[in-house]
Every structure is written in C-alpha cells, then in structure tokens.
Image: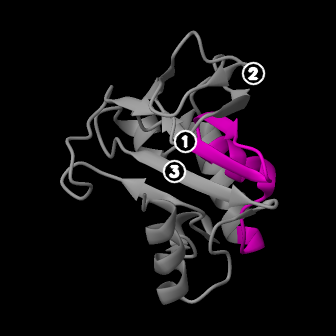
C-alpha cells in the first residue's frame, strides 16, 4: 500500500502492487495490463533500457548514504512505465512493465479496459538478477501532483483506494 517503507531503497511506496495469488487474478510475466479509465497517454517508455547491476548498485548505495532515493533514481527504479492523464489532475501510472503496446503513444487517447502493456519486473532488483522473479503490476493513482494517500494513516489510505476501485 502507499506509504509502506521500502527499506532497500530508503523510501516509501507510492502505489499498490498486484501479485499473482494476492490480487484475485492470475498475474504473471506478460499478463496484459489494462487502462483503468479513459484518458490520454502522457508517458510511454517504449525505449526503456533495463538497469544494469552496476547502475542498481549505484542507486542503492547512493540512497543508503543519503537516507532517501533521489527522484531521478526513483523514476529509474519504476522501470518501463505508462502514465495516463484522466483530467481533473488525476493521473494513473503503470510501472515495472515488460512491454508497452505499440498503439500506446504519448498524446494518444486510450479507453478504459484497453490493453496498454504487459506485466513484468523492469527497474526492480529482481529485474536485474532474474526476469522470472517478482513479476507484478505496480499501479499508482496521482491526484493534484501527489500519490493517492500520501502521508495519511493506513486506514484512510485503504478507504481512498477502496473508493477508487468501487463502481
């Protein structure tokens, strides 16, 4: 959940992770990822290059020395991403993707339920060491320039995320 500590990089989690067995659906490497809602693509990392072992070591060492992860390093750790602007300052982010659908390009409108990418583990330590480990969808909702639930107590965060997924 958002605000959970991420000790390995000295930061906090900004979204929700969907893993197989914990998400009421089979989620494995290559599972299609669907747009949560209609919107316009504002980021699509088609040219993403996986982090090297040396780069990962550098990011994690720097984060440990500083006690936090730089925004640029955090962005790198998100791996291959798609961001969709839904209007009214709401943006969804789909992170650690294996691949992005070719039709998903910056400036293109997508429909809710449209395939935008595929589950992977890009940008993670496991993505560097073993592409078959820890595949999942990391999903973020941003409102007004901050992730949903930032700095709120767990019960409030859960309430907001339950509302976001309610019809």
Q: Which residue is mark 1?
A: 95
Circle 3 crowding by C-alpha within 10 Å: few under 14, some 14–19, many from 20: some
Which mark is drawn over residue 115? none
Comes first in the chain, label 1 or label 3: 1
Q: Which residue is mark 2?
A: 106
Question: In which quadrant will I find the C terminus?
Answer: bottom left
Quarter of the figure with residue 86:
top right
Compared to 153, does 121 lie above or below?
above
Question: Percent x, y for residue 128?
Answer: 46, 36
Q: On the rendered structure, is 62 left or right of 115?
A: right
User: Could you tell me how far apart the alpha carbons at marks 1 and 3 are, in whole angstroms?
Assistant: 6 Å
Question: Percent x, y for residue 120?
Answer: 40, 34
Which mark is drawn over residue 139? 3
Q: Is 3 in front, or is 53?
A: 3
User: Could you tell me how far apart the alpha carbons at marks 2 and 1 are, in whole angstroms?
Assistant: 16 Å
Single out the residue that lies furthest toward the top.
Answer: 102
Circle 2 crowding by C-alpha within 10 Å: few under 14, some 14–19, many from 20: some
Single out the residue that lies furthest toward the front.
Answer: 167
The image's colouring method is one colour
Q: Is 26 in front, or is 52?
A: 26
Are the two marked residues, 1 and 3, in contact with CB atoms closer than 8 angstroms? yes
- Which residues lie in the magenta part? 65-94
């Amino acid at each position: 959940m958002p605000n959970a500590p991420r000790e390995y990089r000295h930061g906090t989690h900004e979204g929700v992770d969907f893993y197989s067995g914990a998400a009421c659906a089979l989620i494995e490497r290559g599972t299609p990822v669907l747009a949560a809602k209609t919107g316009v693509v504002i980021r699509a990392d088609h040219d993403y290059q996986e982090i090297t072992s040396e780069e990962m070591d550098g990011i994690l060492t720097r984060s440990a020395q500083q006690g936090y992860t730089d925004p640029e390093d955090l962005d790198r750790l998100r791996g291959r991403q798609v961001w969709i602007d839904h209007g009214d300052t709401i943006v969804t982010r789909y992170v650690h993707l294996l691949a992005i659908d070719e039709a998903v390009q910056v400036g293109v409108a997508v429909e809710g339920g449209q395939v935008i990418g595929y589950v992977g583990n890009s940008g993670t330590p496991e993505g560097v060491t073993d592409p078959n480990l820890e595949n999942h969808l990391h999903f973020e909702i941003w409102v007004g320039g901050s992730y949903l639930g930032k700095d709120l107590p767990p019960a409030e965060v859960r309430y907001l995320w339950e509302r976001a997924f309610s019809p």
